[in-house]
Image: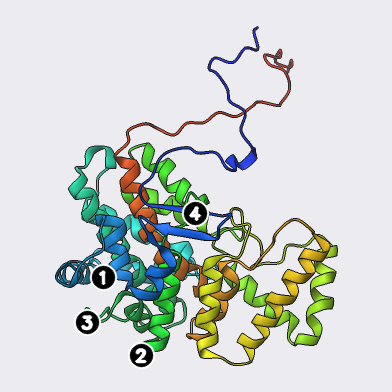
Amino acid sequence: MSNTPSTTEIEVPRGLKGVVVTETELSDVRGLEGFYHYRQYSAIDLAEQRTLEDVWHLMLLGELPDPARRAAFLARTAPLRRLPDALRPLLPALAASTAHGGPLTALGAALSIAAADRGIRPLYDTAPEQRVEDALFATALVPTVLTALHRLQNAQQPIEPREDLGYAANYLYMLTGEEPEPAKARAIEQYLISTVDHGFNASTFTARVIASTGADLVACLVGGLGALSGPLHGGAPSRALDTLDAIGTPERIDGWIRERVLAGDRIMGFGHAVYRTEDPRSRMLRGVAQSFGGELVDLAVQVEAQVEAILAELKPGRELHANVEFYAGVVMHLCGLPREMFTPTFAAGRAIGWSANILEQAADSKIIRPSARYTGPAAPAPLPTV
C-alpha cells in the first residue's frame, strides 16, 4: 500500500511552539519584550488601575465599562454567584468523594451539574447572546463552588456570597467567613486580573479545541480545568512556595539550588515557554508582595536574584527568570489562602479568559483537527495466528 499521506502535512515544532493556529482579538503575549495585553490594554496597567469586574466586562463584552455600565454589570452578575438549588444538596457528596484531590477536582463535576440544571445547550445550537449569558453564569459561579467545596472538605459549612462585595473580596469572604482587609482583597484582585488570560497557553487552547466541536460552554471550561491542573501549568504556585520552605534561610540558597540544577531538576517558579525576559506578572506581584513585607518576602526576593544568577551561570543563554507562579504563591499565602487553594484561585480568574476564548472560537465553525505522524510498526501487518 502507498505510504503517501491523504492530505498535505506541514512540519511544525513539537508542542506547536510558535505555531499560529488562529486569529484572536482577545490578548497577546510579546515574549521578547516582556509585555502582554488584554484587547488593546496592557494587562499590568489593568491590574494596577482597574477592578476585576472591569476586566471581566472587557473580555466578554469587548469594552471597558464606564461607571454606569460598571454598575449595570455588577447588578447583572452578582445574583449569578448563588449556588443553584439543584447543585446545593449534591456538594457535600462531591466534596467528600474528592477530598484527597481538593476542590479543583470536583469543580468540573459541579459546573456540569449546574449547566445541566440551567439547560445550557451546545454552542453550535446557541445564539451568540445566549452564549454570553451562559459564560457570565459559569464564571460568576466558579468562586462560589470552589469555596463551598473547600469548606465542606474541611468540615465547615459553605458561606453564601455577598452581592455588595467585589469578585475578589467576595471570594475571600466565602473562603474564610470574614470580610477581608481591603489590602488583601486588592492583592488577590490584582493577581486574578494578571492571570485572566495569557495567549494560547495549554488550558486556553484545550478549551478552544473543545469549543471548535460545538460542545456546550461548560464542557469547554471543564476541559480547560483539566489542563490547568497539571504541575507544568497552573499547579506550580504551591510548589514554588514549597521551594522557599525547603531553602529556609538565605545561606542555603546557593547550595540548594545548585544541587538541583546540576541534577537536572526543574526549579518551580522559574522559566517560561514564551518570555525571554522578565515576566511582567512576576514583576508586578513582587511589588504587591513587598507592599506587605516580612521575612518570607525578603527571602523570596533573595532567592529570585540568586536563582537567576545561578541559572545564568549553569545554563548560559537560556534567559530563565521568575515566572508568575513564584510570587503568586507568596502573595496568596500572605493573604491567607491555604496552599490547596492556590491553583483553584488561578482557575477562578482564568475561567474568565477561557470563557472569552470559547465565545470567540464559537463564532468560527471550523473544527480544530491537526495530524500526527505515525511511528509504530509498518501497517498493514498480518494478524498473528491464534
What label does residue 178 carry, if any?
2
Marking on residue 81: 1
User: For the residue marked with disc 2, what is the amino acid?
Assistant: Glu
The amino acid pointed to by label 4 is Val
Q: Which residue is drawn at 27% across and 81% down?
A: 165
> Which callout, 1 or 4, points to the residue nearer the camera?
4
Mark 3 / mark 2, whichever is N-terminal: 3
Q: Is residue 104 left or right of residue 265?
A: left
Mark 1 against mark 3, which lies toward the viewer?
A: 3
**Mark 3 or mark 4: whose residue is earlier in sequence:** 4
Q: Quadrant of residue 363?
A: top left
In the drawing, what numbered circle is on residue 164?
3
Q: Along the polypeptide, which appears first: circle 2 or circle 1?
A: 1
Sequence-first tag of 1 and 4:
4
At label 1, counting other C-alpha atoms closer than 10 Å, the crowd grade (few under 14, some 14-19, many 20 or more) is many
Q: How crowded is mark 2: few (under 14 residues within 10 Å), some or many (20 or more)?
A: few
Rounded to the nearest angstrom, the CA distance separating label 1 from label 4 is 31 Å
Q: Distance between the residues labelled 3 and 4?
A: 34 Å
Q: Which numbered mark, 3 or 2, is in the foreground of this view?
A: 3
> Circle 3 — which element?
loop
* Place of residue 364 in the rendered image (x, y in percent of width and height, measured from the top left): 32, 36
Which element type, helix, strand or loop, lies under badge 2? Answer: loop
Q: Nearer the viewer, residue 277 or 47?
A: 277
Per the model, the C-alpha gap separating discs 1 and 3 is 12 Å
